[in-house]
Amino acid sequence: MADPLKQFAVKPVIPIEFGTLNLSLTNSSLWMLVCVFVAVLIMLGMARRRALVPCRTQNVPEIFYEFIHAMVKDTLGHHGRTYMPLVFSLFMIVLIGNILGMIPFGFTITSHIVVTGALSMLVIGVVTVMGFVNHGLKFLRLFAPKGLPLPIYIIIIPVEIVSYMSRPFTLALRLAANMTAGHTMLKVFAIFSIQAGVLAGLGPMLFNAAMVSFEILVAVLQAYIFTILTCMYLKDAVELH
Amino acid sequence: MDNEDFNKRLADALKQAGMNKNEKNKEDSGSSFAALARGMRIGFEFLGGIVTGLAIGYGIDYYAGTTPLFLTIFLFLGFGAGLLNIYRLLNNIETTIGVNRKEFLDVTKGDDGGQ
């Protein structure tokens, strides 16, 4: 029987080894390159002609851009423009990474916690560094909300610190777990339908057909969640309450 | 007078038919996606708090050699952090930490009159 988790295995495509250093081009890194390539291709479609009346290749990236631009403007305000490139690239990479995983024989790069973890550490790193750059040590006031009775601070400050540290965890875990769970479920039902034969296998197959469309929704939704949470976390770095 | 009356009746009729192009309608169509996103976040916000607490506690214990002590303390702190995350998410205070004091007061004003 096929292993439903086998699809997430990282395999070297072009083995490259320097002594003990393994620098092989794996299927994961290959699909990351494809992801970046597709993102650049889509954006070039927008930048190629810049017509006043957009054609399809220009319309799609413009929708993405305006969507993210509105999100950044709503959450971060006027100063948020600085973070627009970061937020937009994160959105495009996560979205395209999720969607490419839906293509048959594709590899879902965002199903690996190493990838999503790196992205979320980047976000939290930017928030922490920019928070201290913008506010100095006043940024630490984030952990002590004003106007509480004094004894409460003994509990609330550690809780706030743990809550802050839980951000990269949840950000990475949510995306990776959602993608892994969805793809595993698709594979499990595909195995059912192969094992059940032609007639009985039709049930799981129809279920899978519905699940594929649901997975596309999840792919877009998780990219949206990742981006909006990035904006919300960046809000702390931009304006301190 | 007549014109004003007509505009009012037109707005009412459009509202009744659900066709008014005011902000409320636009918000409704946009917010179902946002509400779905918020719903899918809740479980992980709670889980994330506990997992983080466990990880920190285990890490401190691992290096300090005080095995169950910090694990227990940070498990409870993580539990608290998870609950705090959910509480803020549900209160539409859209940052998980660092209470926006003004919004926080606006939300809680109905409950206990704020501070």
Image (spheres, rainbow, N blue to C red):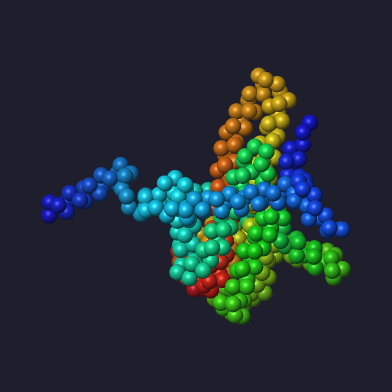
Residue A28, compared with residue B50, is above or below; it is above
Residue B103 position, x and y percent, is 48, 67
- Horizontally, residue B19 falls left or right of residue A132, namely left
Residue A211 position, x and y percent, is 60, 36
Residue A87, compared with residue A78, is above or below; it is above
> How many numbered marks appear?
0
Q: Nearer the viewer, residue A205 or B41?
A: A205
- The residue that appears at 75% across and 65% down in the rendered structure is B56
- The residue that appears at 21% across and 47% down in the rendered structure is B9
Quick check: can you spot residue B53?
A: yes
- The residue that appears at 40% across and 49% down in the rendered structure is A54
**Direction left: furthest residue:** B1
**Direction bottom: furthest residue:** A137
The quadrant the N terminus of chain A occupies is top right
Q: Nearer the viewer, residue A45 or B54?
A: A45
Residue A233, compared with residue A108, is above or below; it is below
Residue A218 position, x and y percent, is 58, 45
